[in-house]
Image: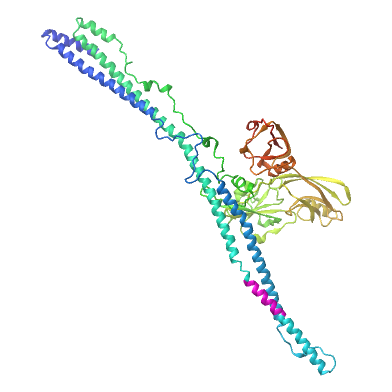
Amino acid sequence: LLMAQQAKVARKSSQKEADGNIQDFVAMIKKELGKMEDKIKNAVTAVDKGCKDTYANLSAGCPVYASNTSFLPSGFDGDFTPLREAHSSCRSQISSRKQEMNSCKSSRESLILQEHTLTAQFRSINVFESPEECSVKGTDVLGYLASMRDHFDGKKTTWWSTYYKLENVTQNITKWNCTEKELAYYDKLTECSEKQLALEETACELHARTKEACALLPSCFDKNWKGYSAQVELANATIQDLRFEFIAVKRIVCMLDAFTADDLEAKIEECMSKKYSGAAISSECVEGFLDASMPSFITPDVCTKGITSILHPNDANFNETEYASQHIAAGPCMASCCELELYHWQTYTNAFVTSEHYMYDSDTNRMVTFTNMEEAKNACETMGSVLCFGIYDANCDGPSPENPVKIVKAPGIDLESVKESSVGSCVQKLMSGPGTTLTTTTAQSCIYEIQYSSSQAPDEVKTLTVEHQEYGEAFRFSGCDNQELDEGKACVASGAQNGVRLLKNRYGQAVATGSCCTSETNKVILAEAKQCDGYKDEYTKYSSMYLTASNLIRGTSYHSIRAAQIACLKMGHKCWGLFDDKCDMGNLMLVDGDLNITTSTMRESHQKSCVYEKLKV
């Protein structure tokens, strides 16, 4: 409206004077406006090009991988076999080196003991008494002299005999120098530790490089896509501003045309009512943003499936899968990626502590007990070895609401204060440092059904159930108790002063009781594991199905289904079940229990393989 008013004033002024150069002036202004329009379009072109360039560079700086790309440490070809074999071979030599060292030390100690005995013997005979020690009957001088001669000849013979024996033993001791064998043993231990470290450090680096590379891949494209989105947003704002400028130029040109029109006011009205389009000011890149997508990239299989060649050394199952399953006695992990624990626990079986060593809460004056072993250990580790000596488990079968474990306070107690238990109690002592890594693939919590008889009724078989026992445990009745167990006290009250007979495992822990300790005796007839780690000794069969080799436990092969079932039960939760490649009982392998096997993991078999799943309780 303001422009229209100014146009009218300008036209009236021009009418009062000569037309002059008004048309030339309008032409000059329109020429400048044309230049402005060209600049706007050039700016649009530049914005669109910048946006397209950003889109074209979405992959810039991002790595390009294939599906089989792996991220191996420098100088490593991905095959752990040489490292494993070097470590395994080294560990296999330790026992012989240790045996040589111990045999040498034993022989030397035996010779030293002989030397001490012969030295004492030699000293006892290296004394010559007077002739008066000769016992002579009568007053015959010649007889006396003969007796003295015989006596001292015997002394001389014994002296030289003992001397030569002592000399021989002493010379042999010098030959049994065990220093070299001892050094060879410890050198071998050091060598094996270095080979174990090489294996674990390589595994650490492989996992670290893989994790870093796999994380970088999507983050790189995400970063570039965010940059592209920001560029599009900025370009869109610029395009909008240029579009407004373009429309303004078009409107000004229309008003300028009104100066030369015959009907000024009509032309101005036309300019004011006209709607100008900014469609010419647009960007293909901005308008196509909603249809654009992030460039596709190949994610290596190792990023989705993980590293299958070896577990991370800090994984809880590393020792079992890498060492224990191969019967390798490895040391604790010292690789850079392993976390070392401040404490470890040492179990002392057949041990108990008296009540004055129990810990009491200073606020409530109540005994500190726990019904969960992990909570008890955490509490003790939090206090540290200065305040907490360990944990007392009266039945050595873990805590329960009925029989919680007790915290033993540290001040005023040491291992000498721990007494021997007649019922198989145990003490778990808090020890500093990570300790020695002990691994096992044997189930530690099995339920046994035990059948036993009595001497008074040998044909009558009784059955009892014993829980929380290691697979392969052996049981026998041994000893009696009349102090620690309620059953023993009951037998004493009934007249059996020795208490109750104890059923013990091979560690000497009392796991159950039998008859009172009288002339009646008990005998174990059969002990059979029925469940281990929450699994039954029962299986579900899947016919015409198979599992890939990656799901099987390496080195397991059995030629009868019962042998395979026993091995699987023994491994507890570490064994998921069995695989028979031809379903003919000819070659059965164990299925790894750590891989979350389900029926969806199985595949249809064309050679009639079959799979056996171990049933949970």
Does the magenta stretch mainly form a helix, a strand or a loop? helix
Tell how many labels.
0
The colour mode here is rainbow
Q: Quadrant of the N terminus?
A: top left
Residue 270 position, x and y percent, is 26, 7
Foreground residue among 462 and 330: 330
Instruction: Please tell me whether residue 595 is drawn above or below residue 257 in the rendered image.
Output: below
Q: Is residue 508 left or right of residue 76?
A: right
Instruction: Please tell me whether residue 6 is drawn above or below residue 207 in the rendered image.
Output: above
Instruction: Please tell me whether residue 123 is drawn above or below residue 110 in the rendered image.
Output: below
Question: Quarter of the image holding residue 245?
Answer: top left
Foreground residue among 418 and 541: 541
Foreground residue among 463 and 401: 463
* Membership of 342 in magenta stretch: no
Task: Tell me the residue at 83%/57% (across/down).
Answer: 497
Task: Tell me the residue at 42%/22% (across/down).
Answer: 290
Question: Visible in this render: residue 360?
Answer: yes
Residue 543 position, x and y percent, is 70, 31
Q: Is residue 475 left or right of residue 231?
A: right
Question: Quarter of the image holding residue 305?
Answer: top right
Residue 514 position, x and y percent, is 81, 50
Q: Is residue 26 left or right of residue 330?
A: left
Q: Which residues are magenta?
A: 161-174
Residue 370 position, x and y percent, is 65, 47
Q: Quadrant of the C terminus?
A: top right
Question: Visible in this render: residue 334?
Answer: no
